[in-house]
Image (cartoon, rainbow, N blue to C red):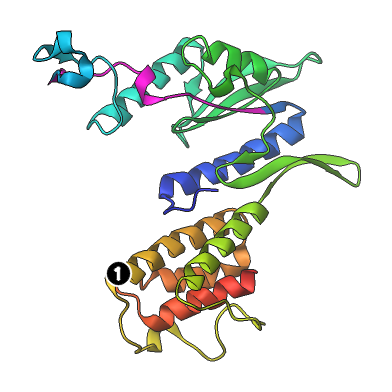
Amino acid sequence: TQLDLRTPALCQEAESVRIAFTYAALNGVDVFAADIRNAYLQAPSSQKDYIVCGPESGIENVGKVALIHRALYGGKSAGRDFRNHLRSCMRHLDFVSCPADPDVWMRPATKADGLDVYEYVLVYSDDLIMIGLHPGEIASQISQHFKLKGNLAEEPTQYLGANVGMMTVEGVTCWYMSSDEYCKAAVENIETWLRKKDQRLPTKTACVFPSKWKPELDVTPELKDEDANYYQQQIGVLRWLVELGRVDICAEVSMLAAYSACPRQGHMGAAIHLYAYLK
């Protein structure tokens, strides 16, 4: 599981996925997931960039000028070029962008019993979730324009760090999104960091914050740059845990996030205590 800072766009995507899963369960349609392979490199570049070839291009090409035709990673316009290319593909397949979330694409369909439904494709960078009567066919249509990892699409077991799948409870079939694996990985990450400092997580944590501790009253020394950077990373991890369903730590994570610009040792201690609570 990749542990990094999560953006507002990603949080919106998590909410869109939850809504999409609900829609799939209510209307009896399937859900598939797929990844676009080497995403940016499959899009044409909108810039007239060039390089002067060196020895790595072959002795016969040294000194020659080479035009860059693909949206290389790191290019200023690479992300935009890929998104525009993907948008052209979706429009070619008769999908339209949802007004509420431009990265949710939809097109009408009709079930065998005559019920009108929608087919959806949720896009986050190179990750795709397809919801519809025949999501495999949607993936096949997209693969005519983009190469997919493994050249296949299948029912997802994980998406954006969350465990996802289908389950039946009291005769009702539904899709679920769980933070279990991401939470375990986050705890292991903080424990590895603490071991390097000859520390460990507290063993008795009945509540989310240390007893009677308040972040706004903390006057402990400020963290050094390296530890402050790690604290900021952990705020991103904890925030994503909230998005995946751990609403029991929402208020505390919000309070700790308010001190990301200048965290103190007490704030780091509270974050460590919160991880002990999660464990």
- What's the residue at 38%, 18% (across, down)? 42
Q: Position of residue 155 (x, y in %)?
A: 69, 30
- What's the residue at 42%, 49% (across, down)? 8
Question: At numbered mark 1, what does the secondary structure look like: helix, strand or loop?
Answer: loop
Quadrant housing residue 243: bottom right
Residue found farthest to the left:
63
Few, some or many C-alpha atoms within 10 Å of disc 1 (few <14, some 14-19, many ≥20)?
Answer: few
Taking the image as drawn, is residue 47 in sight?
no
Quadrant housing residue 116: top right
Residue found farthest to the right:
171
**As displayed, is residue 164 above or below residue 53?**
below
In the rendered structure, the answer to whether residue 104 lies left or right of residue 75 reads: right
Q: Nearer the viewer, residue 119 or 234?
A: 234
Q: Position of residue 194 (x, y in %)?
A: 49, 72
Please give the range of residues in magenta.
Answer: 32-51
Q: Nearer the viewer, residue 114 or 63?
A: 63
Taking the image as drawn, is residue 95 in sight?
yes
On-image quarter of the C terminus: bottom right
Q: Position of residue 102 (x, y in %)?
A: 44, 32
Amino acid type, callout 1? Ala
Q: Nearer the viewer, residue 134 or 273?
A: 273
Q: Nearer the viewer, residue 69 or 261?
A: 69
Q: Which residue is the site of mark 1?
A: 261
Taking the magenta stretch, the answer to whether it contains residue 138 is: no
Residue found farthest to the front:
59
Count how many numbered circles sit on residues in the image. 1
**As displayed, is residue 250 above or below residue 146?**
below
Q: Position of residue 275 (x, y in %)?
A: 57, 71
Taking the magenta stretch, the answer to whether it contains residue 39 is: yes
**As displayed, is residue 176 above or below residue 247?**
above
